[in-house]
Image: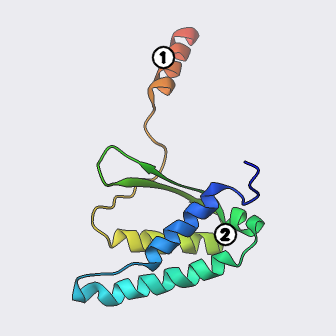
Amino acid sequence: RGHGKGPPHLYTWAGVLGGLAKTQSEVEETQAEAKEVADMAKRKLEEYTKWSEVEKADFVKFCRITKIYQEGQSRLTLMMAHTVAGMEARAQLVRVLDSREGWSRKTGRAPAGYMERELADWLQHFLN
């Protein structure tokens, strides 16, 4: 707070782009594809860094990377603007990640947690 640099999710998205910009492949057949991904990410990152904080916040609504139970894996939660540019960026990222092993895409609402289940039970009991 008080640092004047904007919300942290804007920098998380820049980090995702920066990580993709360093994409390399050890396998010769996929080196051209990896170079294409890296070049695309570099262009997007350069474009993104020129935007104002307001433009960045309008484009990236939410971006967070969190640890999960599996060692060495993380969860990327991403919400882009519902504009043509936002949907293109999201589609490009999904296309890149779909070509990787160890990646799974989950959409929609997460399963109910403990508090949600307890509240549903309480409401059901209260309404009956």
Amino acid bearing label 2: Thr
83 relative position to 123: left or right = right
24 relative position to 65: left or right = left
Amino acid bearing label 1: Asp
What residue do we see at 76% from left, 50% from top? Answer: 2
Relative to the observer, which residue lies in front, 115 or 55?
A: 55
Q: Are marks 1 and 2 in contact (CB under 8 Å)?
A: no
Describe the element under mark 2 as helix, strand or loop: loop
Q: Measure the C-alpha gap from mark 1 to mark 2.
A: 39 Å
Relative to the observer, which residue lies in front, 7 or 103?
A: 7
Q: Answer whether residue 26 is visible to the viewer in this image.
A: yes
Question: Of the residues under marks 1 and 2, which one precedes in the sequence?
Answer: 2
- Return the mark for residue 3: none
Q: Is residue 128 above or below residue 117?
A: above
What residue do we see at 63% from left, 56% from top? Answer: 8
Residue 65 % position (x, y): 48, 54
Residue 90 % position (x, y): 53, 68
Q: Which residue is mark 2?
A: 83
Q: Which residue is mark 1?
A: 121
Q: Is residue 55 above or below residue 77?
A: below
Q: Is residue 52 above or below residue 36?
A: above
Classed neighbour count for the residue bearing mark 1: other residues with Cα under 10 Å, few (<14), some (14–19), many (≥20):
few
Classed neighbour count for the residue bearing mark 2: other residues with Cα under 10 Å, few (<14), some (14–19), many (≥20):
few
